[in-house]
Amino acid sequence: MTVADASRQYGQGNPAFSYSVTGALVNGDTYATAVTGVPVYSTTGTPTSPAGTYPISVTGLNSNNYVITFVNGSLTVAKATLGQNGLANITLTSSPNPSNYGQSVTFTATVPSGVTGTVQFTDGTTVLGTATLSGTTATSTTTTLAVGTHPVTAVYSGDTNYNPATSAIDNQVVGQAGTTTTVASSLNPSAFMQSVTFTATVAPTAGATLPTGTVQFSVDGTNLGIPVTLNSGMATYTISTLAVGLHTVAAVYTPDTNSLTGSNGSVSQQVGAVSTSATTLSVAPGTVMYGDQATLTAVVTPSFATGTVSFYEGSTLLGTASLDGTGTAVLPISTLNAGVHTIVAKYNGDPGVPANTSNTVQLTVTQRTAPGGGPAITVTVNDATRTATQSNPPFTYSPAGQLVNGDTYATAISGTATYSTTAGSTPGTYAITVTGLTSANYTIAFVPGNLTVTISPSTTTLVAGPPSPQYGDPVTLTATVTSGATGTASLLRRFGVAGHRHGVERRCHSNDHDSWCWHALDHGDLQW
C-alpha cells in the first residue's frame, strides 16, 4: 500500500491524499476485495508549516488474506507566490506624488500578513534603497530624485515561504523645486563710504539640498559687478561707495540646473552722512617772487570725500579745485600781488561728507626782479631840447623790462610822474629826473634824461618917427628886439648921394644868450 505523493503552496490546506495498491493476488481476488477498511491519512505538514517535504502515512486499511506493507508518500509544501491563489500581491505607493526636486518622498511597499524579508525599491535600474518588512510594510525615503517621471517598483526578496515578487510600477513625478532668496546686511544703517557686506542665502522650499548657481547683486536696479557663485548656499558682496540715502539692495538667484527655480530677495539699506570732516591746507614754497608759482594743497579727511575745495584770501576767491581719489585738491597760483597773503581752504562738502574750513597759511610774495637780481623795470626819462628863452617842454619817459601775468606798463607802473631839472635860461645840458612813480609788484629803477638848452634866435624891428621928417627935424629911432633879449643895440648910419636910394645893410649883434639882427639903408638918404 503506497501513499501517493502530493504538493501544495505554503499557507494552503492539504490536498486530498490517495494511495495505490500493488502486489500479486490469487483466487481471483481484486484489490477492492483483498483490502478492506477506510484509509486514514496523516502528515506533519499543516497549513502553517513552512515550505518543505513532509511524510504522508495511511492507516485504517487491512487484509484478511494478505500481508500488507505500507509505504509513506511525500507532501511537498512549496513557497507561495504573492498575487496567486488568492494571495494578495505586493503593492507600492509614494507620498507625496507629485513632488518637487529635493523634497522628501517616501515609498511604501505592502505585502500580505506573514510575509517576511526585505524590499528593494528601484527607479528603473537604479536602486533607491532597501528596507526590511515590518509587519506588512517596508518603506524607503529619498530626496535625490531628479526632475522628471520616475518608474519606481518594489522588489520583494522572498523568504522561506514566499517567492520573490515585484510590484506594479509607481510613476513618481518630480517637478522643479522652488527656492527662496534672502538678503542680509552686515551693517544697517551704515555711514557714507563705510564698508557693508551683503549676504544672499538661497534655500530650497522643500528638502535640504543646498542650491548651486550664481547670485547677481544690484543696488537700486543697477548691477554690482558680475554674478557671484554660491558657496554652501550663500553669496556675498562688499561695497563702500553707496551714496547717502535709502537704497534697495537686491539679489537674483540663477540656478545652474533645471532642478531648481530661480528666486530673488532684497533688503533696504539706509546710508547716512559722516558726522565730521577736516581739511589741512599747506603752501609750497612759502615765499615766491611775483609771477612765480606757488602750490596750495588741501587734504580732506575722510579721504573718500568727493567734490571741490575753494581757496580764499579773505572773501576773495582765488580758485577752486576738485578732489582726487585720495581726498587731495591742488591749486597752482602765480597772480597774487606782492605782499603777505593769508589763505584758507573751504571744502564744499558732498552728499556724504559735510563741508569744513581749513587752517590758514601765509604766502609771502616779493617784488619781481630782473634775471640776475636787478630792477625788473627801468624808467628812462626821454631827452628834450629848448632855447634859452623857452619854457621847459612836456617831459616824458620810456619804461622797459620783462612783465609777467599779462601786465602792461600802464598797469605795472602807478603814480603821477613829476619831473625836475636845474635848467634855466643859460644854454647847456641839464639832467631831467622823475619822481612819483612806483610799482607794487616790480622793482623799479630810474634813469634821468638830458635837457639841452640852446641860444635863442632874435629879430630887431627899427621904427623911425616921424616917418617923413624935414631936414633938421629930430627923428626918433626905436629898435624892438625879441622879448626876453638883454644887452645893447647899436645904430649905424651911412650917407649916400643926395636924391639916391640907399642900399640895405644887415647888421647882427649877440650876447651870451641872445643874438639879434637889423637892416639899414645904404648909398643914399635915410629911408625909414
Image (spheres, grey):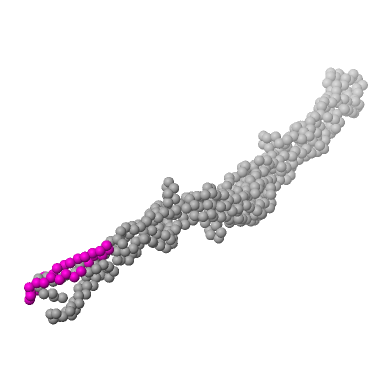
The residue nearer to you, when weighing 303 against 189, is 303
Determine whether, in the image, residue 295 is placed left or right of residue 250: left
Quadrant of the frame with the N terminus = top right
Q: In the image, residue 75 lies at what x, y percent? A: 83, 27
Count of numbered labels shown in the rendering: 0
Quadrant of the frame with the C terminus = bottom left
Q: Residue at x 26, y 67 (%)?
A: 487
Determine whether, in the image, residue 413 is placed left or right of residue 93: left
Q: Which residues are magenta?
A: 490-516
The residue nearer to you, when weighing 386 against 460, is 460
Query: Where is residue 47, by image quadrant?
Result: top right
Query: Where is residue 496, by image quadrant?
Result: bottom left
467 w.r.t. 361: above or below: below
Q: Is residue 97 visible?
A: no
Instruction: Give yes or no for residue 156 being in the magenta stretch.
Output: no
Q: Is residue 340 visible?
A: yes
Name the residue furthest right.
Answer: 64
The residue nearer to you, when weighing 95 against 444, is 444
Query: Where is residue 161, by image quadrant?
Result: top right
Q: Residue at x 78, y 34 (%)?
A: 132
Q: In the image, residue 37 lies at what x, y percent? A: 91, 27
Q: In the image, residue 503 lies at what x, y percent? A: 11, 70
522 w.r.t. 103: above or below: below
Q: Residue at x 68, y 40 (%)?
A: 232
191 w.r.t. 51: above or below: below
Q: In the image, residue 121 lies at what x, y percent? A: 72, 36
Q: Residue at x 36, y 59 (%)?
A: 432
